[in-house]
Image (tube, helix red, strand yellow):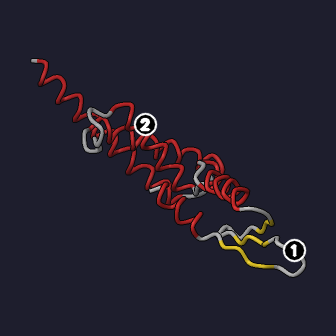
């Protein structure tokens, strides 16, 4: 997907003649709305840098960061590549969400409505852990 997006971004670069520039120079309009004058190779590197900045986690939304953290936590306990339903993976995902909500409550102490959501997540994680303990002891016998 990233390659397709990068190809799309680089293909949307167009050159426009500008009377203010010296003869033979063209103004390069990039889809990232940056302007530069010069050859296409300069634009390609600028476009690649813009894409790199676009896809970094620091520039991502809060939801995107949470999704990445959940995926990393679940990857540590996954039994196979697409494992999202096992109790271990669910507990890992819930733990990441709980940690984020606890950080939220450090700043917003009076947020009662979100606190109810935190309690629901804590109960769901506790029940899943209880199920996992029960399942592991029954499989050991």
Residue 23's disc is 1
Q: Please report the residue visible at 52 percent of the width from the left and 56 percent of the height from the top.
A: 63
Q: Position of residue 131 (x, y in %)?
A: 22, 35
Q: Please report the residue visible at 32 percent of the width from the left and 46 percent of the height from the top.
A: 124
Which residue lies most toward the left here?
A: 141
For residue 78, above or below residue 10? above
Element carrying mark 1 = loop
Q: Nearer the viewer, residue 62 or 38?
A: 38
Q: Please report the residue visible at 74 percent of the width from the left and 62 percent of the height from the top.
A: 39
Residue 34 appears in which quarter of the rendering? Answer: bottom right
Position of the C terminus, as image quadrant, is top left
Residue 130 appears in which quarter of the rendering? Answer: top left
Which class describes the residues within 10 Å of circle 2: few (<14), some (14-19), or many (20+)? some
For residue 22, above or below residue 58? below
Element carrying mark 2 = helix
Horizontal relation, residue 24 to residue 8: left or right: right
Q: CA distance from mark 2 to mark 1?
A: 57 Å
Residue designated by label 2: 73
């Amino acid at each position: 997907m990233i390659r397709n997006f990068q190809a799309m971004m680089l293909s949307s670069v167009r050159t426009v003649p500008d009377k203010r520039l010296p003869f033979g120079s063209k103004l390069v309009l990039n889809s990232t709305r940056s302007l530069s004058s010069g050859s296409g190779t300069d634009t390609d590197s600028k476009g690649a840098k813009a894409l790199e900045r676009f896809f970094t986690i620091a520039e991502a939304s809060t939801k995107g960061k949470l999704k990445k953290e959940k995926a990393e936590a679940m990857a540590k306990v996954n039994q196979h590549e697409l494992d999202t339903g096992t109790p271990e993976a669910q507990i890992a995902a819930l733990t990441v969400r709980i940690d984020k909500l606890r950080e939220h409550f450090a700043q917003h102490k009076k947020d009662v409505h979100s606190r109810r959501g935190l309690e629901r997540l804590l109960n769901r994680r506790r029940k899943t852990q209880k199920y996992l303990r029960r399942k592991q002891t029954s499989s050991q016998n």
